[in-house]
Amino acid sequence: MSDSTPETPEADQPKTPTTPEEITRKLEDFIKNTLGGQVLFTRVDGPGARREQESGEKSGEEPQEDNEEAFEFHYKPADIKAHLDRFVIRQDEAKKVLATAVCDHYHHAQMLREDRESDSTGPRLEFSKQNVIIIGPTGVGKTYLVKHIADLIGVPFVKADATKFSETGYVGADVDDLVRDLVAKANGDIDLAEHGIIYLDEIDKLSSGPEKLGRDVSGRGVQTTLLKLMEETEVPLYAPNDIRSQMQMMFDTRKGRTGREVVNTRNILFIVSGAFSGLDKIIEKRTNRKSIGFVSAGDSKSTAAEHLFREARTKDFIDYGFEAEFIGRLPVRVVCDPLSADDMFQIMKNSEGSLIRQYEREFAAYGVKAVFEDDALREIASRAEDEKTGARGLVTVWERVLRDFKFEMPSLGLPELRIDGALVKNPEQVLAQCRTQAATFAVELGVAHADEIKGFAERFQRDHGFTLDFDASAIAAIAARAQREGAHVDVMCEKLFKDYPFGLKLVTRSTGETSFALSADAIANPDKFVSDLVVSACRQQPPPASNIIDITPDSTAHES
């Protein structure tokens, strides 16, 4: 008898992964099960991934050169401003400055590429990047401007909050991740990513004024690390401190992918923005002019600050807490105007991205046509101005006014909701009128469709042997529901009572009843109605005779 351990059948042995995809899947499962995290490996993040997908390269083959056409820019400043006018109301000066800066930047980048590709032996072209800083209160369209510029010219766009970054990347995010995000937005196309736009909001939160004590991990240090990105540097495509990025590099290398592993930031346009609360005080002190002295008495406090912001100098930003090297790399400065009530009215009335279009779609999803009157828009605009949050205040005010209407209108069955000044000023009263109108409308619909519903009841009785007796409220409810869901009354009846034949048979078997009265409650929840009928019928049915045990004294039944 042999003492050797019996061999494990081949089918029982764990399968060794043989392809990078299998290894990736195994690693993902391992990290998810042991570390509680999730790791995603995408084929587009690594260099050469897009080329492999498009050309069908096999693993191990030498990658071919990237033959994609270089990024082309052919817009004029007026073209960009005209596009922005469709979405952003006012801010004309900001649109002009931004459009000009963007055109200058991309035309220079195009000239540099053509100069490098030429055989000229003369001096090479050079240019200073025109990175942009935007100053303006919240909700005036700063992000909207940059986003729509990127959409128009077709470059990847990355937006981030400046406060989430730290100098080292160990506490908070690494600023180099912004460049890697551009590559991801460009689906792995490094050439396209190198012409993208990086937008940093809340940049004023990075200031390190004298009042800030202790170790600064998110202000001065981040300014320093941003310096290299805003001029020209090469960012590693794989983050050295990120295990997922390093694993991606390992698999790309194993698949035979070689190519560029860095992203050059020379042609990436950086745009930063912030509200810069308190900067106006610094400018006022430098100019030795009080706000009340150099703006008219009728101007608001925000308008006075706007005038001061237009006189901002580099020294003012340095006094605010920015490094001279950092603010010097943002030569183009744009001031966005605060929004008045009339501006907000124009945003709702004329902007292609108007919030009104969103509300119209939301009501239309329930078959309700929402009609917005100008007097309602002006009342909302006036209230939103008092919120002091710019265009974001429109959402706050509208949600407060329409909250109950959005909840009840889908169930009332009314085909139209007219939103006017009276509704905005007294929404509770108008909603009560809608409820009354809905009840009247349902009765009128019921009268109009009563014959169709009775015709369905006759067919139901003929086909299944059961009589459905709809009262007036049930007829009105069926007609209103068909109107609300955009269906024909016959189709709605078939939908509501498709399961009734089987359920009513159980009721008839127990009680013998074949006629059933239906009210509006049965229409609101037909399944519950027939289920309750079945349960009630079963409770009324006496137990079978075979289950009754005779325990009288005269019983002669005995157990053996």
Image: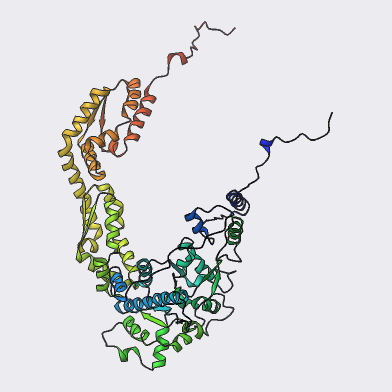
Q: How many marks?
A: 0
Tell me: 416 left or right of 385: left
* Quarter of the rendering occupied by the N terminus: top right
List x then y, in percent, for residue 519: 25, 35
Relative to 126, residue 245 above or below: above
Task: Name the quarter where the C terminus is drawn.
Answer: top right
Q: Is residue 31 left or right of residue 454?
A: right
In this picture, is 155 found above or below 525?
A: below
Picture quarter containing residue 395?
bottom left
Can residue 271 be seen by looking at this rendering?
Answer: no
Give the residue displayed 44% in from the left and 80% down from the top: 129
Residue located at (52% from left, 79% from top): 227
Colouring chosen for the image of the structure: rainbow
Q: Please name whichever residue, 437 or 257, is drawn nearer the observer in this view of the structure.
A: 257
What x and y, as percent, mark residue 223? Answer: 52, 78
Residue 101 left/right relative to 162: left
> Which image quadrant for residue 462?
top left
Q: Position of residue 58 (x, y in %)?
A: 55, 52
Which one is nearer the viewer's eye here, 359 or 169? 169
202 over 522 or under it: above or below: below
- Foreground residue among 382 and 368: 368
Residue 98 placement (x, y as % from top left): 36, 77
Residue 424 in sight from this viewpoint: yes
Q: Nearer the viewer, residue 176 or 513?
A: 176
